[in-house]
Amino acid sequence: MSEEKNNEMSFLDHLEILRWHLVRAFASVLIFAILAFVFKNIVFDTIILAPSNPDFFTNRLLCRLADIIDVPLLCINQVPLSFQNINMSGQFTTHIWVSFVAGIVVAFPYIFWEFWRFIKPALYQNEINNSRGAIFFASSLFSIGILFAFYIICPLSVHFLGTYQVSDKVENIVNLGSYISTITSIVLAGGIIFELPIFIYFLAKVGLVTSDFLIKYRKHSIVLALLLAAVITPPDVISQILVCFPLIILYESGIIIAKRLERKNQVDTPAKL
């Protein structure tokens, strides 16, 4: 019955349904953005500015490790950065921008759920059954990517970029907007990159990629992972390896997902015939 109703809907009807899904998704972002705007002390002091503080979890952990293995270079961000704002409305516009980004991050599971609700009527029952748990896995991977970027990449990036000097006569006083732009871009990039297995699943589902294709271009994917790691991390080897390694694991996970999907299609095909 739902399929017949879906077939009878016009293009404008689909656009109307999509519009309401987008409205609800944006409303969720707006609600969480307002909450982030209100609780600015938590958002800025506890989260955004935390990687630059010596008491940050990763900084303390690396310093302990540095003492154990006697490698002082591992102890990072022991001198808090100095921040400045040079625009009259700089802090206010930064507050709004960060609140909006926080709203997107927190509302991501609901946004994905709204997207799923829009495409679900167009799927067959077996496709719906095979896609169960997609929201959970997509949200989990996005959250893991954000946490990985925040706790691993951000402290390393802050330390490298914040302490790098072309001359001892030049003092680093970081612009607040520049710092926040760096942190948010790294965190969002981490969340999006960790969606790679979900992206591969949908490409394999519609037949655009196969496991053989992914295996054939495995070496190319490693080079691409290195290039991507070089873009979203500071130019030091340790940070690039820390980013590249998960990317390779995610790509290999995509190959496994594509293989399982192909095997399932081979089993289902004779039954349909």
Image (cartoon, rainbow, N blue to C red):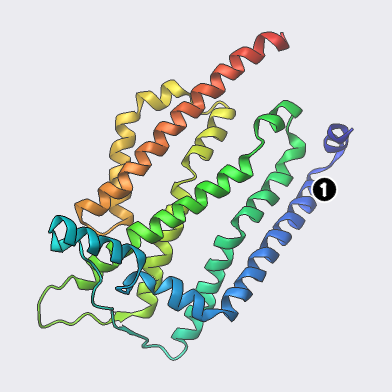
Between 221 and 105, the one nearer to me in the picture: 105
The quarter of the image holding the N terminus is top right
From this view, report whether residue 34 is shown above or below residue 124.
below
As drawn, is 111 to the left or to the right of 260? right
Q: Which residue is mark 1?
A: 13
| Tag 1: amino acid | Asp
Q: Residue at x 63, y 75 (%)?
A: 34
Residue 160 pos. (x, y %): 22, 65
As drawn, is 242 to the left or to the right of 213? left
From this view, report whether residue 116 is shown above or below residue 212.
below
**Dot 1 surroundings within 10 Å: few (below 14), some, or many (20 or more)?**
few
Residue 46 pos. (x, y %): 45, 74
As drawn, is 155 to the left or to the right of 4? left
Residue reaching furthest to the left: 168
Residue 179 appears in which quarter of the rendering?
bottom left
Q: Residue at x 51, y 53 (%)?
A: 143
